[in-house]
Image (tube, rainbow, N blue to C red):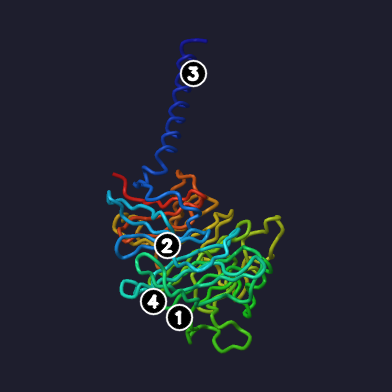
Amino acid sequence: MGHAAVRQARLRHAVVLLVVLQALLAAATGRAQTAGYRVETVASGLVHPWALAFLPDGRLLVTERPGRLRLLAPGADGRLALSPQPVPGLPPVLAQGQAGLFDLVLDPGFAANGLLYLSYAHGSLQANHLRVARARFDGQALHNVTPLLTTQPAKAGTQHFGGRMAFLPDGSLVVGMGDGNQDRTDAQRLGTHLGKLLRIGTDGRVPADNPYVGQAGVRPEIYSLGHRNPQGLVQVGGRLYAHEHGARGGDELNRIEPGANHGWPITTGGVDYTWARITPYRSLPGITPPLLEWTPSIAPAGLAYYDGALFPAWRGSLFVAALKERSVRRVPLAGGVPGAQQRLFLELEERIRDVRAGPDGALYLLTDSANGRVLRVLPAP
């Protein structure tokens, strides 16, 4: 080989090496560092944590799916520490499979009345319901636990409970209920709560302006229908957003209007777990289409809206916790229209169950495992 050929070979080798190094550098830095954030562990040792709430005094409440409510309070060093014992006073919870203790939301007047709301599986393996109860938290224990809603009819099995809750501006409470994964067409039947979003008052009464009030054979709590397993709810500027699990694909982000039909199972972008076709239709007249669809499935599990000061570039965005994708999707909103998505926190390589915007401007995550963690996302130094 001549000198010119040797020089050419060395040049090609150098170019290949440079390309490889650039790719490695992009892979190493493109996850956390270029995003400008750092992730710290606030608490660990939680068993499948499901939901998080921020108390006015700086403490945190966390639900665990096996049926425990845990308190995070500042320790001697000022850092938040997990209480050694669960908060007492919780009602009995059916905890098996997907069933257990789910969401937790504080009453809009919590600072004055101490009221909070819990959703959980209630009953037996053969006959169970999603139940919503109100309780008073005195800072240490729950008191006066009062059931407000018990979905009807009873269903068998431990799948597709939904469970997320959100308040509307008028103070009413919206609750997501899954289809139970028994007869999926129940999501289209108005005589059952299965596969619906439900709306009640904080005393459990049905608001007079619910879309189906007064109609014979219809459950008056129904707010919208055609849902498979809704596990994300958030209200933004008076608009209600929800996401739900599809089957093999067809996960959806929806904007909810009273009385809207969101299609499951007569329209979907997914197929069954057997790869069988669920329906030939992706859209139909009278069906409200999703704002976004994720196929393949990301398994959306929690939903938050961020408008804090710590991350100016994230303001005005929805954040979608994803179990299967092991990520959080940032979905910027402009006039209610979703923009280009950003995948975050893939470097954690953990199933993310919930995402919340904290009062301190940080973003908080719950990891879904038998040794689950509460994580806080802060700007990188």
Which quarter of the picture shows residue 190? bottom right
**What is the distance, in whole Å, between disc 3 and disc 2 at their CAs?**
69 Å
Q: Nearer the viewer, mark 4 or mark 2?
A: 2
User: Residue 77 location, x and y as percent?
Assistant: 27, 48
**What is the distance, in whole Å, between disc 4 and disc 1 at their CAs?**
12 Å
Asked if labels 1 and 2 touch by Cβ distance under 8 angstroms, the answer is: no
* Number of the label disc, if any, that sits on residue 169: 4
Who's the residue at 57% across and 64% down the image? 94
On the image, numbered disc 1 is attached to which residue?
A: 201
Q: Nearer the viewer, residue 329 or 2?
A: 329
- Hey, what amino acid is under mark 1? Gly
Asked if labels 1 and 3 touch by Cβ distance under 8 angstroms, the answer is: no
Return the disc, 3 or 4, that comes first in the chain's sequence: 3
- Hey, what amino acid is under mark 2? Val
Q: Nearer the viewer, mark 3 or mark 2?
A: 2
Q: Nearer the viewer, residue 323 or 10?
A: 323
- Spot the residue most to the top: 2
* Number of the label disc, if any, that sits on residue 9: 3
Asked if labels 4 and 3 touch by Cβ distance under 8 angstroms, the answer is: no
Q: Nearer the viewer, mark 3 or mark 1?
A: 1
How many numbered dots are placed on residues in this image?
4
Who's the residue at 47% across and 22% down the image? 13
